[in-house]
Amino acid sequence: MNCKQLLLSKKAACNAHGEDSSYFLGWQEYEKNPYHPITNPHGIIQMGLAENQLSFDLIESWLARNPDSTAFKSEGVSVFRELALFQDYHGLPAFKHAMAEFMEELRGNKVAFDPRKLVLTAGSTSANEILIFCLGEPGDAFLVPTPYYPGFDRDLKWRTGAEIIPIHCSSSNGFRITKPALEEAYHQAQQQKLRVKGVLVTNPSNPLGTTLAHRELETLIDFIVAKGIHLISDEIYSGTNFDSPGFISVAEAITERGEEVADRVHIVYSLSKDLGLPGFRVGAIHSQNEAVVSTATKMSSFGLISSQTQYFLSLLLSDKEFTANYIAENKKRLRERQKRLTEALRTIGISCLESNAGLFCWVDMRHLLKTKTPEGEMELWKRIVHDVGLNISPGSSCHCNEPGWFRVCFANMSEETLDISMERLKSFVLSGDGRGKIGRGPRRLIKWVRAISAFDRRSER
């Protein structure tokens, strides 16, 4: 440690933020050489960013019909001064009410969310971190199923001092959560002399693009009850469930479980994925636990949502005709885009985990590895980033212990850019740079060309 570092806190001097993960390193490579169809057509295409850019036009059309929403007017009268003045950290009542109703609508109105038990946060990153602060002490552990969102290593651990113990899930059952896997993770924490305070899941899953089955939710609830711990359900992709089976919120699963269980279950939500508004920094915690709501509300003062943002979104989300149309149309577009990606990959000989939600696919490239090791996965990833020009996220960054899986995002680009990315990938595989069977021999080549041509014709319709 040098002299300058001695003047800093341990947190500032250490490298525990997680930016050395391949997940973030891929972003850095993209930022050095970003693809642009005109100015940089040979640049790196960003397929490592889970953004939803497919339905902006629906929001823009609403804005054109409702200009007062961004002019800060109510029935033609300016509310600018009211919004510009100090607002306490409880949030605007109109927005909390609209947000709660939108969350209910996404869940088919099968559950109710009390706006008074909703804590507003600056995105889901803030929401998850606040919950860790509320539920645990530095050094306490939270169990998280793998593969999981790489940012959790930063969001859950960096400032809180908490530890993550992976619940290792397997491709043999589609990476489903099982009781033996939960018990093994709990045992691992005990061996490390860590006190387990909870389980955190993403539902729908990032990076799998799947929803938790009812039996998995029941297993999780039984587990946290037996261990006397908490369950955090990050449901920021709840509105992306574009295919069957349907999304089941943990709020629905605990309906008949009683108050004691409800006090241990906490839901995180955000408008970053469903509405595609990560730049607005809008997140929320919903909890039946009064102490958690009270403490989380106080902690939210370190990352508030601006009054102007709340005002605009309260009007948008209160328009029930808009929200109903948006939810249906957005799911339709996600389903079409996911199909476009999976069919293109299939013609190259690459399969995906069957998915029904999310903004990405969990792609199986195990057959392209030169060695079925973490090192083999990193070698393939580096070639795909630098030689193919695609930034995708390697499974190891998601703590998957089966080398060869990758998360590939499909909703943050145009159809044309997605098609170009697939053209690049097929050239890589066909050239023999990939270890796959495609391209080995003229018969396979003819079959592959015919499949690509058929896909292209379908895409033009």
Image (tube, helix red, strand yellow):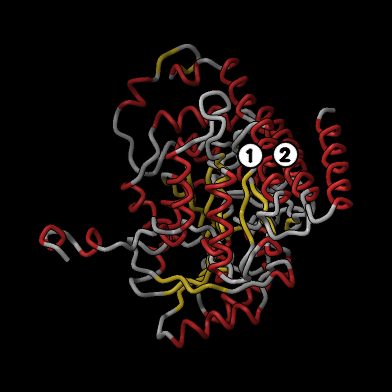
Amino acid at pointer 2: Arg
Residue projecting furthest to the top: 76
Label 1: which secondary element = loop
Provide the residue designation for mark 2.
337
Say which quarter of the image contains residue 333. Answer: top right
Residue 165's tag is: none
Q: Which residue is drawn at 35% across and 24% down?
A: 82
Residue 128 placed where, x, y %?
A: 45, 57
Q: Which residue is drawn at 74% across and 72% down?
A: 172
Work out which quarter of the rendered image holds the N terminus and state it. Answer: bottom left
- Mark 1 and mark 2: span between their CA atoms? 7 Å
Please state which of residues 330 and 217 is positioned toward the viewer in this rendering: 330
The reply to whether discs 1 and 2 touch (Cβ–Cβ < 8 Å) is yes
Residue 437 vs 315, above or below: the answer is below
Please state which of residues 387 and 17 is positioned toward the viewer in this rendering: 387
Residue 411's tag is: 1
CA neighbours of label 2 inside 10 A, class few (<14), some (14 to 19), many (20+): some
Q: In this view, does 106 lie to the left or right of 19?
A: right
First-in-chain label (1 vs 2): 2
Amino acid at pointer 1: Ala
Residue 135 placed where, x, y %?
A: 41, 67
Residue 109 in sight in this render: no
Q: In this view, does 156 lie to the left or right of 185?
A: left
